[in-house]
Image (cartoon, rainbow, N blue to C red):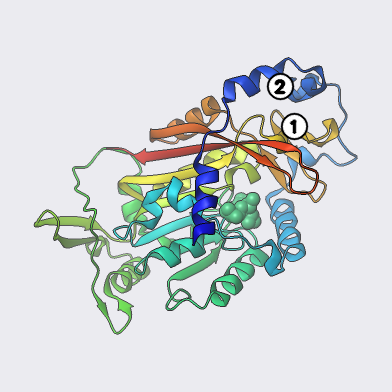
Amino acid sequence: MSGDITEAENYYSKDFEWEQLRLEVETDPTFLYHLLPFNSDGVSNSTTDSSNSSPLEDSDAWNKFHSRHSTGKFFKERRYLLKEFPELACRGHSKVLEVGCGNGSTALPILRATENSVIYACDCSNEALDRAKENISAANLTTAQDRFHPFLCDVSTFEFPKWLACISCQERFMTAGETQYSLCSEERTCCIGGVDLVTLVCSLCAYFYLEPLCFYLKFCWQTRSLYINYLLLFYLTYQIFTLSALPLHRMTMAIKQCFSVLKPGGILLFRDYGLYDMTMLRFYPEQRVGYREYMRSDGTRSYFFSLEFTRDLFSSAGFTELELEYCCVRSTNRRNGKIMRRVWVHGKFQKGK
Ligand SMILES: C[S@@+](CC[C@H](N)C(=O)[O-])C[C@H]1O[C@@H](n2cnc3c(N)ncnc32)[C@H](O)[C@@H]1O
């Protein structure tokens, strides 16, 4: 337990100023190629034009990545995220959507922290979903397997499956802020014999396209009031190191999809690689596939986000910014003692208000 706390504290802290790092990087000639506009950098890419990889090639690369890293050694729970995003450990948000769940390293700590949370988790890689299922089942956590629903979806290219959210609700609430609504922070669902009635009604509603059933009444014990709630739509969704894996031109689709399955007032949690993170500066010129976009030798991609770019991306999809900042963490490489400066972008965005 004390190990968990140390890990969370380490990742939560702000060890250096991002502006200082920016100055150093932008005045260091050895890093110049990272700053050049992509088309004029004069660096020829490899024999194939990897910058235009197809969705199939991208998910294939991730499949291979997850097969290569299938041992338990590679699996490390991201417990610090519960500190960074307390919403993830909040008992009120029973049904959440994870986009790009990988091997389950974010899902498992959430399932541990909350007894009632149900996670719908997608990934474009079948291998990733298999790893996630294995890791969650190996954790031997009561009911965790029943509360984890993995499904295959490339969010940059395909829409979420119809059963995930009621289509008529999605269309109705595509535009943020159109409706009056109330959200209760203390969601209660009725469970009989392990079956969540709300989920059952939701599935039937989606199956038969019964719009009137998309609403249900809910009594909130906290405020002692009755609320109308919308079935199937999510209050919480999160993307942890997922968006950076997508080609730049397909990111908007992934964000808009999340927007469409959120309830009005719903929240999207975002954490990903930040501009001038140590791993960005280690890429070679020939690994650049776009401006701030790189491709590893195994064909997986990595984009590095600035706050400005992140802000534009989410606001153009209809989100309101609640939190957005760089997390700057200094850590030491155990093998060579070198100091590593890690930069992540932490963001919290809301659908309307
Ligand atoms: C860097 S990993 C992060 C995994 C996990 N979120 C974590 O924090 O450990 C990126 C994940 O996104 C998935 N991914 C990449 N492109 C995707 C897409 N278009 N749709 C859904 N998942 C995708 C990959 O298969 C991989 O599991």
Residue 261 at what x, y percent from top left?
A: 39, 52
Q: Secondary structure at mark 1?
A: helix
* Side (left or right) of 340 relative to 80: right
Residue 153 at what x, y percent from top left?
A: 56, 59
What residue is pinned by disc 2?
Answer: 25
Residue 222 figure quarter: bottom left
117 in relation to 229, above or below: below
Residue type, numbered disc 2? Val
Q: Is residue 142 visible?
A: yes
What residue is pinned by disc 1?
Answer: 281
Q: Earlier in the sequence, mark 2 or mark 1?
A: 2
252 in relation to 201, above or below: above
Q: Are marks 2 and 1 in contact (CB under 8 Å)?
A: yes
* Side (left or right) of 37 relative to 345: right
- Report the residue at 61% width, 63% height from top: 103
Q: How many marks?
A: 2
Residue sitting at the far front: 2
* Side (left or right) of 138 relative to 147: right
Residue type, numbered disc 1? Leu
Residue 2 at what x, y percent from top left?
A: 50, 58
- Report the residue at 36% width, 40% height from top: 350
Residue sitting at the far bottom: 193
Q: Residues within 10 Å of mark 2 (few under 14, many from 20)?
A: some
290 or 74, which lies in front?
74
- Report the residue at 33% width, 56% height from top: 90
Quarter in which the C terminus is drawn: top left
296 or 52, which lies in front?
296
Q: Is the CB atom of the residue marked by disc 1 within 8 angstroms of ligand 1's nearest atom?
A: no
53 or 134, which lies in front?
134
Q: Secondary structure at mark 2?
A: helix
